[in-house]
Amino acid sequence: MKRHELTDQQWELLAPFFPRQPPKPGGQWKDHRLMLNGILWRLNTGAPWRDLPERYGPWQTVYDRFAKMRHSGLLDRLIERLQLRLNQAGLIDPDLFCIDGTNVRAARAAAGAAKKKPAAR
């Protein structure tokens, strides 16, 4: 097993969320586990999609599956299921579990805006 990939036990927990048949007649979907492993590799490494290892298939295929999972709400359901399981096992401390909403504004010049020119005298 490669780093950042799901174990058999982890996949058993997530497999029921994925359809067993291709969604369209004649559609040939790549293996759900392989696509999820590719998504996890990308999210864990922070690498660009184009740098996805070839063992996961074309990066566009993995990205398309990620986008579909995100838009359909499947990723949210997976995360909720995992959080529920961790909470039931007592592995989440509610005092420490939070989302940081901090943001930092960059100067306009950081976004490519023109710099102010000194006033003519």
Image: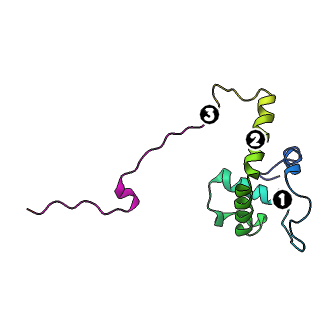
Residue 111 placed where, x, y %?
A: 40, 59
> Dot 1: few (<14), some (14–19), or many (≥20) neighbours within 10 Å?
some
What range of the chain is rendered magenta?
99-120
**Quadrant hosting residue 38:** bottom right
Q: Are marks 2 and 1 in contact (CB under 8 Å)?
A: no
Mark positioned earlier in the residue sequence (3 or 2): 2
Res 84 visible: yes
Mark positioned earlier in the residue sequence (2 or 1): 1
Q: Is 82 located above or below residue 117 in the figure?
A: above
Please give the residue where the numbered disc 1 appears in the rendered image: 32
Q: Is 22 located above or below residue 14 in the figure?
A: below
**In the image, is residue 111 part of the stretch drawn in magenta?**
yes
Please give the residue where the numbered disc 3 appears in the rendered image: 98
Q: Name the secondary structure under disc 3.
A: loop
Tag of residue 80: 2
Which residue occupies 79% across, 53% down?
Answer: 2
Q: Quadrant of the C terminus?
A: bottom left
Q: Name the secondary structure under disc 2.
A: helix
Res 4 visible: no
